[in-house]
Image: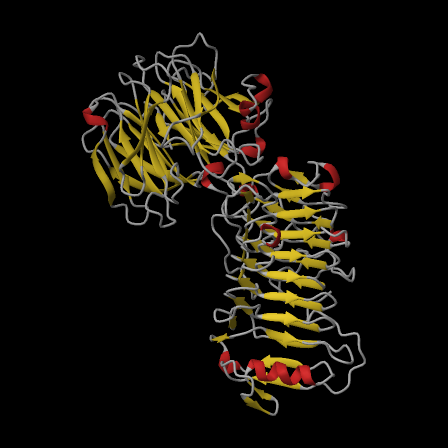
Amino acid sequence: MTRARPRLTALEDRLTPAAYVVDRPGDVLNDGTGLTGSIRYCLTQANATPDGDTITFAAALNGQAIQVTAGLPIEAEATAGTITVTGPGAKLLKIDGAGSATSIFTVDAGGRGAVSGLTLANAADGGAVFVSAGAVLGLSELVITGNKNLGASGGGVNNLGALTVDGCVLVNNTAAAADPTKSSGGGLYNAAAATAYVTNSTITNNKANTSGGGVMNDNATAGNATVALVNCTVVANTADADGDGNGDGGGVYVAFGGATRAANTIVAANTTGQFPSDVGAVGGTLTGSANNIVSDPNSAGGLTNGADGNQVGVGVDRVIDLPGGLVDLGGQTPAFNLVAGSNALNAGSNALAVDAQNAALTEDQRGAGFPRVAPAGGVVDVGAVEFQAGAAPAPAPAGLVGLDLYAVGPGAGGAGTAKLYTGAAAVASLGDVFPGFTGGVRTAVGDFNGDKTPDVAVVTGPGAAARMKVLDGKTLTALFDGAVFDGFTGGLFVAAGDVTGDGKDDLVLTPDEGGGPRVVVLSGAGFGQVASFFGITDPNFRGGARAGVGDLNGDGRVDVVVSAGFMGGPRVAGFDGTTVTTSPKKLFNDFFAFEPTLRNGCYVAVGDVNGDGKADLIAGAGPGGGPRVVVYGATGLLAGQADGSAVLANFFGGDAANRDGIRVAVKSLDADGRADVVVGAGGGSSKVTAYLGKNLTPAAAPVAFDLTAFPGFNGGVFVG
């Protein structure tokens, strides 16, 4: 089916429809003559004649907003004609309901309408659209945003009739009636006996004081309420937005057996209050639903992971770029970009990608020029947007796979310098970052100033008062250059990640030999201290500690992993990132990454090697040991399985004959959405070796590439 506005096909025998043109931005009833005038004039004229008239907008209005002071009614016509309102595109023209205490568009009982190509915004009450019982309405290529319903359910759309929605975005709408029985469906409310068929649409950041932050299907009076969500993206909506404990179903709520079906749809990162809640239900579940992605396994509407093509328990970070927000990907409505290697790619069912008339969807949310199945003859993606050949996916979140850029610094005995690499290619030398210093340079890469360009942090090894320098990724000028750790001379380790959740990576510092197992977090926003705690619960230990940062539990916030340093056993602890700046809470019981008899500690990094939406733990042997690398799956660790059952890979990195340990880092080398492992020799060379996450198994670890970072230097390297 090719989308041609209007989407709703009139069923009547047409008389002679009139073509009205809105040519002025005002909202005055009698402001017009003939076939031109204000929007209220044109709609009033169309309602007065039983012939299915059309209303379009003069090009001179593009870029303006038409502010309405009351609802715009679509009334019943004697011939059941369809009144069609066709805008120039949601980017070009807005109808603003800020002055209206009612819906922007209302469709009376018996009325038939089709509205497309507009932004409908800021209705102060009544939501953007109200569809009466017995009315029929088609909505397409609309952005419905910033509307409220304070007297009834349905912050964006309140449907009591027969509704089709295609290629629309419902965002930032609110259902907030004082009566909790009338404050559901932040994006869309579907009443008993009503039907709503929604395709190729995004429903996000809507709120309901009661249930159904995104969508509410309310069959309270057993009236056969029916909702279908086909190739939709329903994310980051909130139920129980007022926090009174009354509500459920942050994404979708099914009430009293209302027939609710989802196909090829993403339902993820929705909440009830502060808790994950994708699909809620009382007396019902999702029925006949297949090929969906639901992030919260405890609120999946009866869907089971692996059954009927459904993926349950997949973190939103494995699917779309939620932190990046709605962006312009072409077409008339904004959308969420898919991340590299998204679980949505080719995971749908072509047979289920159909409209209300069972015709195949031919375009995705963006409309003309964006095929619903790409390439032709392939398999449809899950969600509102199809990945198109040649398009650039959003990078997978750094908390899961790391950045593509990494920094290499020499071990003890080398010059105070460092180099930057992308893959096997050197892209920059940082020069002499610590002039005259030969105690080694430890490195980390992150976006500390929030400009979307990776910056570089370097810290000194043993032999001088601890110093840190942070270099701007664009200019290589210093964002920070100074002493840290109060003059400690035993050297530091550094890791990077957005611990505070403010959109800027933070720095996690730990001392080397002679220091306690203390972890200090410095904010990327100003480099002030935001956390300080013992990562290993033995404050008398003086072998130092090493840290890694990544999203172990898949909650969208990076967590902190800490290992004991030299002369300690290879003990590892993990801390929930949401608690690190207040009272650090452990994610799993401490365990030994290698044999507990060893006393050389270990190095750690964190990244999603197996692509399950949770960052795994990578451990590298400490100084004096063989270059052994073990990858522990996050799912197993969080379940208390810190043993062989949690091991995803176990191999010797770099030169297997080396006995100086191995330093580890996580990077995104091939942009496939999985973390890749980069290791640096602990000594004997300056060799860096890389392994692609997709190729790592318990039995195999093929080398992707290796390189010599500092030819002629054999004191080992640090990677970060």
Q: Is residue 389 among what the camera can see?
A: no
Decide if residue 705 is on the left or right side of residue 386: left
Give the image location of residue 114, x and y in percent: 67, 72
Q: Vertical placement of 292 versus 384: above or below?
A: above
Give the image location of residue 709, x and y in percent: 36, 32
Which residue shows up at 66% across the image and 56% down it? Answer: 374
Which residue shows up at 64% across the image and 43% down it? Answer: 279
Name the residue at the top extreme.
597
Nearer the observer, 214 or 457: 214
Give the image location of residue 264, x and y in percent: 68, 49
Q: Vertical placement of 250 versus 621: above or below?
A: below
Which residue shows up at 60% across the image and 38% down it? Answer: 296
Nearer the observer, 692 or 497: 497
Which residue shows up at 31% across the image and 37% down it? Answer: 457
Name the residue at the right extreme.
13
Q: Vertical placement of 234 versus 584: above or below?
A: below
Decide if residue 407 is on the left or right side of residue 254: left
Give the image location of residue 582, x and y in percent: 36, 31
Res 70 → quadrant: bottom right
Quarter occupied by the C terminus: top left
Q: How is the image coloured?
A: secondary structure
